[in-house]
Amino acid sequence: MQTLIHRDSKPWQVQVWASFLIAVFLCAVGLSYLPGRDLDRAFMVMGYFFCLSAAFVLAKYVRDQEKTQAEGKPADTPMFKLVVWGGFFLAMSLTGWGLWRMEVNETYKAFLGVSWLYLITCTVTLAKTLRDRHEADLNEARISGRAPRGAADAG
């Protein structure tokens, strides 16, 4: 019996990485030239990093939940679910609030807002692509008999 292992195509991987890097670049440019007070600039940089890390954590959490439910294993605790989702919504809300209340040109706010949302969507897509590759590598190693001990639990 032959087992099919799904792998993303190279063009898809290039597009995902390119999109993520473009989003990071656009956000960096927007934040680097942000007019106004240093406090606003510092708040927005922290907000973008908070959103970026929260998006990666949320993507991993959702994927882990899907996997544990499919395998019939116990899921994470309700408190962890609250922390993950709460952290994501808090990061997005505080960053959005900071962007909205800043006293800068509306066009500049629009640029920052669009590049920020682009960064979040690219982050989720990148997280999924990386996780798919990791799982395909594990499945391939398991089939060929060279999976390291405990590799099935990794990720």
Image (tube, helix red, strand yellow):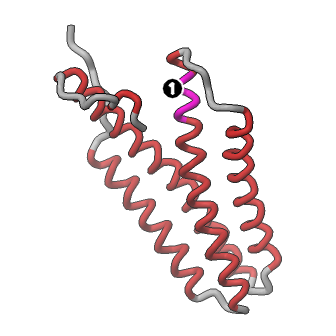
Circle 1 residues within 10 Å: few <14, some 14–19, many ≥20:
few
Magenta span dominant secondary structure: helix
Question: Looking at the picture, how far across and down is residue 75, in whole percent?
Answer: 61, 26
Instruction: Give left or right: position of 14 versus 30.
Output: left
The answer to which of 130 and 11 lies nearer the viewer is: 130
Front residue of 94 and 72: 72
Screen quadrant of the N terminus: top left
* Residue 28 shown left or right of residue 137 in the figure: right
Say left or right for 146 vs 15: left
Judge whether residue 66 is colored magenta: yes
Residue 88 lies, in percent from the top left, at 68, 52
Residue 11's x, y, as percent? 29, 49
Q: Which residue is drawn at 31% across and 32% down?
A: 136
* Residue at image location 69% in from the left, 73% down from the top: 110
| Residue lying at the far front of the rendered structure | 149
Q: Is residue 26 above or below residue 76?
A: below
Number of disc labels? 1
Amino acid type shown at disc 1: Lys
Instruction: Give the quadrant of residue 108.
Output: bottom right
Residue position for label 1? 67
Task: Say whether residue 105 is left or right of residue 51.
Answer: right
Residue 21 versus residue 44 in the image, above or below: above
Residue 31 pos. (x, y %): 59, 81
- Range shown magenta: 63-68
Q: Does the magenta stretch include residue 141?
A: no
Q: Which residue is drawn at 17% across and 23% down?
A: 144
Say which quarter of the image contains residue 51: bottom right
Q: Where the C terminus falls, by quadrant?
A: top left
Among all residues in the image, which is located at the extreme right? Answer: 101
Q: Could you tell me which residue is drawn at 67 percent across and 46 percent down? A: 84
The local secondary structure at tag 1 comes to helix
